[in-house]
Amino acid sequence: MREDPMPSSLSEEHQALAAGYVLGDLAPEEEAQINHMLEANPAMRAEVEALQTSLMLMPQGLDKVAPPLHLEDRILEAYAAEARDNPQVATSEIADPSGPIAQRSPRVRPWSRIIAMLSILGLLSLAFGNLRMRQQFAQLETENRQLQQQLARLEGDNSQLDQTIAALNNRGEVASILQRPKSRLVALQGKESAGTLLFTPGQWEQVVVSIADLPPLPPEQVYRMWLALDNGEPFLCGEFTTDKTGAVFVTLNPPKGIPEGVKAQEVFVTVADEAAPLNPTGDRVIVGEI
Amino acid sequence: MARFSDNASDAELVEHLRAGHQDALRLLYKRYSGLVYTIALKMLGRASEAEDLAQDVFLTFWKQEKFDPNRAALSTYLCVLTRSRALNRLKSRSSQQRSLERLQTGVPAELTASTPLENASLAEQEQTLKRVMAQLPDRQRQILELNFYQGVSQSSIAEQLNMPLGTVKTNARKGLMTLRQLLGRAVE
């Protein structure tokens, strides 16, 4: 593969800006500058894309390590198991081609064969067999419902356990902040979610966030918590995700404090792609007045 | 009976995978398991965790169905997916919180159309990247790799390497610019 030299219409300064953008190390004023350029300058957009591709291709240069032989079987077995358990993600090869699996319990199938046998024995015995089959089917359905309820309960327990672990991990921080004389609790309100922010004014290096009923996000997305400062600048407190129920209880540790003499007026949370630049763009899903 | 040959394109295999053909996953695994496992092992350092992550990546790839063969090369997509998942595991190792520090890792949120280099064979890509990475000054390569594979922020790298933050930033940017310049039109 030949790599032809790269003539670029961008100055070295702008190329460095693009590199900083891809590496995520821009200062706020640089970020404003490049955001403007990305909108107005196709060469800058192309450069950013080429830099991102270059960075992402770095692993191709690693000396490849062959995975252990058993890994292939392990992955294919996991695939088959998941396809069995979740027929909606599986398709023709796994699913019964004669109809949707979800509508027929596999445990009931032997009864259809019994019905066929009963039909040979005559109408009377068929009717009798049918009646028994219906009773059995009803029983199986009841069992199935009970199992699903148990599963839902277990999943609920698991979720509660996760929350408990998180709560235990955060209890120390909460106690520590509450012991400070000026600690404050701010109510956070979203369309369907609500929560609180615990902090000490002037000591933004540690805040505790508790929110319920946020929409759970796909894996590549995160929630970001921001402060709106009275100098007009946004300040990133940190990012988090929720558990399956949309709840979060987490301590955030912003790496730097807000500038001296500047006050926070509002706190808000946005949704962002994990790798998106650190800008408070997008809808504010929950806000609180400080 | 196999519905497709070993020479089937990635796009064809992905289509078969989504149609429920396990053989497609087997072939995709044969093509890309080395790449996925290598990245996982490089980032996590433990074979057992690298195996778990490789399984996670292939099953997530199958279930999410987010990959669009018309918009990205599968090798790059799997690199990004593996790295992103490995960074998540590194984060959860150190803390439940996703710290700001590890945000500074610049994974593109969206992949762009495949470039000539991404359309080349895996062997060609490996050969090219090996040659180009070897041309980077050691310091630049070291900083880029710390940032990329370990998600380490530039301020932490400055502490680790005992050098001013500004020097780390300059080296990281120069390293990436040099990498991109050496790859030239192959990544456009």
Image: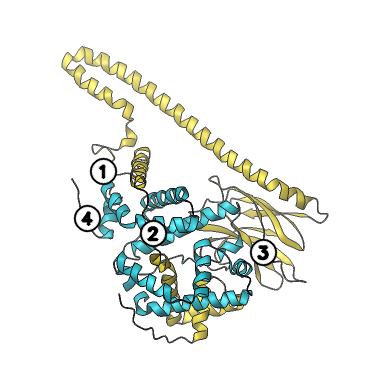
Chain colours: A yellow, B cyan
Q: Out of A80 and A282, give the one closest to the viewer.
A: A80
Q: Which chain does the numbered disc 1 sit on?
A: A
Residue to which mark 3 is pinned: A255
Amino acid type assigned to the residue bearing label 3 in the image: Pro
On the image, which quarter does residue B99 sit in? bottom right
Amino acid type assigned to the residue bearing label 1 in the image: Ser
Amino acid type assigned to the residue bearing label 4 in the image: Asp
Q: Which chain does the numbered disc 2 sit on?
A: B
Q: Out of A76 and A129, give the one closest to the viewer.
A: A76
Residue to which mark 1 is pinned: A92
State the SS at label 2: helix
The numbered mark at residue B6 is 4
Give the CA separation, mark 2 to mark 3.
31 Å
Image height of A229 relative to A79, above or below: below
Compared across the picture, whether A288 is left or right of B116 comes to: right
Residue to which mark 2 is pinned: B78
x and y percentages locating residue B126 in the rendered image: 35, 67
Q: Look at the image and tell me in which quarter the C terminus of chain B lies.
A: bottom left
Hey, which residue is sitting farthest right in the picture?
A181
Q: Out of B174 and B109, give the one closest to the viewer.
A: B174
